Image: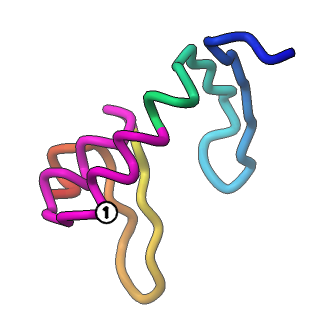
Amino acid sequence: MYASRMEWEYKDSALDGNPVTTTTSGKDFAQQFADAWATPTPEGLVALLHPDVTLLQPHLPPIHGKQAAL
């Protein structure tokens, strides 16, 4: 049986290599994700990101932080 809250950790060597740990409800996140894509806006999609996000896109410099992603 699955717990109502999930804890997960990942390490992405493409970033700074520091592990990121979060506790979130998988069901809550899935609903937020579905809502954001049902009526997509830059603000709605950015709301899904971690404050310390680093976005990597081809042919563009890295974008660091939620505010820079807007």
Decide whether the magenta segment is chiefly helix, strand or loop.
helix
Crowd around label 1: few <14 · some 14–19 · many ≥20 (10 Å): few
Residue 9, quarter of picture: top right
Residue visible at 38% across and 35% down in the picture: 50
Amino acid type for the residue under numbered disc 1: Trp
Name the one closer to the observer, 31 or 19: 31
Residue 39 coordinates in the image, percent (x, y): 18, 64
Q: Give the left or right position of residue 58, taking residue 32 as reference.
A: right
Residue segment shown in magenta: 30-52
Q: Is residue 34 magenta?
A: yes
Which residue is the site of mark 1? 37
Badge count: 1
Q: What is the secondary structure assignment of the residue under circle 1? A: helix
Residue 10, quarter of picture: top right
Residue visible at 34% across and 40% down in the picture: 32
Residue 3 coordinates in the image, percent (x, y): 73, 11
